[in-house]
Image (spheres, rainbow, N blue to C red):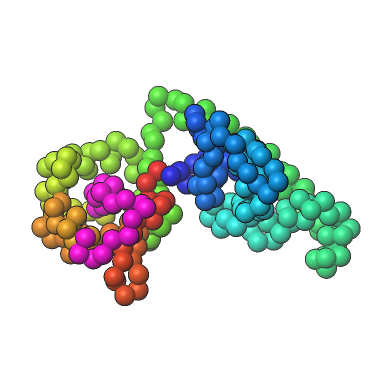
Amino acid sequence: MKTIEDLSLETLKCGYVQNKDTYVCNYCDKTYEIGHIYSFADDLLDAKAAVKRHICDVHGSPLHELFKLDKKQTMLSDVQKRMLSYFADNKSDKEISEMTHTSLSTVRQQRYQLKEKAKQAKVFLAMYELSEQSSSFEAYIPIHQSATMVDDRYLMTLQEEQEFIDRYFSSTNPLQLKMLPAKQKAKLAILRMIAKQFDENQKYTEMEVNEILKAIYDDFVTIRRYMIEYGFLKRTDDGTRYWKPETVES
């Protein structure tokens, strides 16, 4: 499953992903197969209309869901998000001024700043996408949302990751680790690789986790601890159930 940030602008705006045979909701992975008819109350809808109806009924709107994202994802302050919500509700500057107990000039300045931010974002996006098309552009590994202690060690290219995999694994099928690296960036690469051995849709007991890790490396207890510390695995407070967060793999 892709993270919300990996989706295209149009996909973010409409709220669903169109695949060859399906439409999939961005927010809950509810899937509608093209060619099937779906019943909503007294309405019979095709797949595209059904996913739109689902988003409206369950999630409110794509904008409503995007408002739930944190500042790291939107780069917007709470005040800026609140202003956008007023604009979406067609509130006039005067109404917003009264609701927020701020001057009319302040509201108009905030509106202007958001418009400028949108223009700058479009220019940056164009520049970034053009840069990405360059043969010299290095693709970086997306940072999983469940990552902890995020810093420079997470800035890793696809080439760097492959080099770590080649260096520290004696085999990738079956997956077998030669040694646990001391460097943090290398450790992240091997943990990400090990995380692929877990199914996102499954809950594991500690014994099941141990069996998977034991086949990869003798010191499975240390690997298990690192998988938890770096956010590649989650577990219940009592340690009886483990699972892989959906956002670990891009």
Question: Is residue 61 among the parts visible in the rendering?
Answer: no
Would residue 74 appear left or right of 184 to someone viewing this image? right
Image quarter (top left, top right, bottom left or bottom right) of the C terminus: top left
> In the figure, residue 53 lies in which quadrant?
top right
Residue at point 60%, 57% (across, down): 68
> In the figure, residue 160 lies in which quadrant?
top left
Residue at point 57%, 55% (across, down): 69
Residue at point 86%, 54% (across, down): 92
The verdict on residue 199 being magenta is yes
Q: What segment carries the magenta color? A: 185-208
Q: What is the residue that sits farthest to the top in this orientation?
A: 135
Would residue 13 appear left or right of 248 to someone viewing this image? right
Question: Is residue 162 among the parts visible in the rendering?
Answer: yes
Q: How far from the left and from the top, in percent, is residue 112?
A: 77, 48
Q: What is the residue that sits farthest to the bottom in this orientation?
A: 238
Q: How far from the left and from the top, in percent, is residue 207?
A: 20, 64
Task: Return the residue nearer the eye: 56 or 42.
Answer: 42
Task: Return the residue nearer the eye: 32 or 209.
Answer: 32
Disc tally is 0
Would residue 109 appear left or right of 125 to someone viewing this image? right
The verdict on residue 213 being magenta is no
Seen in the picture, residue 45 relative to 104 is either above or below; the reply is above
Task: Return the residue nearer the eye: 190 or 116.
Answer: 190
Residue at point 38%, 40% (across, down): 140
Image quarter (top left, top right, bottom left or bottom right) of the N terminus: top left
> In the figure, residue 210 lies in which quadrant?
bottom left
Q: What is the residue that sits farthest to the right in this orientation?
A: 94
